Image (cartoon, rainbow, N blue to C red):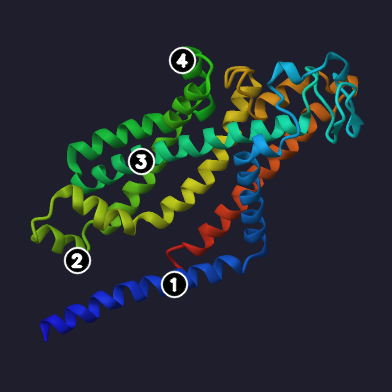
Amino acid sequence: MTTTNTTLESRAVPAKRESMLRLFAEQFFASKLAVLGLILLVLFLCLAIFAPWIAPQNPFDIATLAIMDSKLPPGSVSSSAAMTHWLGTDGQSRDVFSAILYGLRTSLIVGFVSVSVAFVIGVTAGLISAYFGGRIDALLMRIVDIQLSFPAILVALILLAVLGKGVDKVIYALVAVQWAYFARAARGAAIVERNKEYVEAARCMSLSWQRILWRHLFPNCMPPLMVIATIDLAHAIALEATLSFLGVGVPVTEPSLGMLIANGFEFMMSGTYWIAFFPGIALALVVVAINLVGDHLRDILNPRNEI
């Protein structure tokens, strides 16, 4: 009888998970705005991944640039090659559409990598703080409180002033300003779960604290963390663009959308609007797409709902 019950329970768990995933998918795709955001996000990811094959020009290969093609308006034909610059060219004769594709790749890499590293660091700190409590909890949360008391942009500016420019430096700075959000959220969710029966049962079975944290607490803390990760991704991309626009982010040799906007900003007053306008539109669409997905995830994974 015991063996039969165990077998039935082992079959019920995957079935329950499959049912929850099906319900989650139904609720997610019921929102037209969330679906639109997901489609835009997938589109931008594909454009960034396949940029070397999609872009009509490598905008950072000096050999392909011509001085005569500088600041051509949208729809102009190149004087040095049989190519139409649908979004125009910038002050360095680079095709704006190609530059956006390559800049989009840099912005997304910085956003995804920084959020992933901050997620691991912050969630680990939050779970340890909630599980052990006491002095460990007090110490970690005081560090988090100090971190959150300063504006993110200020901390990032100070760190980049010390570290210097570079994609890796920007990622370090963004991780430093983001991990505290995940730590706070993970601690709050884990405190609710740590005294429940399944955690007490795991302790009675003398399981290691590492296994309890990652096999029991972490899966049950995922819903709010998924929402924060999605929203923080948009925040990281926007923050990187701000830092690059201020001249302390990525270098000119590895441009992002923020760097492209900064390069075109000086030409705005002369009527050459397209150099900064189109990268700005691309940045806005990326951030809006991610926020649309994140906002609907927040509604679906609300603990007051059934799922």
The CA distance from mark 4 to mark 1 is 47 Å
Who is closer to the viewer here, 172 or 101? 101
- Please, is residue 218 above or below residue 11 in the view? above
What residue is pinned by disc 4? 163
What residue is pinned by disc 2? 197
Q: Position of residue 168 (x, y in %)?
A: 48, 24
Report the amino acid beneath label 2. Glu
Task: State the SS at label 2.
Answer: helix
Left or right placement of residue 156 versus residue 61 in this view: left
- Few, some or many residues within 10 Å of mark 4 (<14, 14–19, 20+): some
The CA distance from mark 1 to mark 3 is 28 Å
What residue is pinned by disc 1? 306
- At a point 20% along the width and 79% down the height, the residue shown is 7
The CA distance from mark 2 to mark 4 is 47 Å
What residue is pinned by disc 3? 120
- Few, some or many residues within 10 Å of mark 3 (<14, 14–19, 20+): few
Who is closer to the viewer here, 44 or 224? 44
Task: State the SS at label 3.
Answer: helix
Who is closer to the viewer here, 25 or 139? 25
Q: Is there any visible trace of residue 155 in the rendered image?
A: no
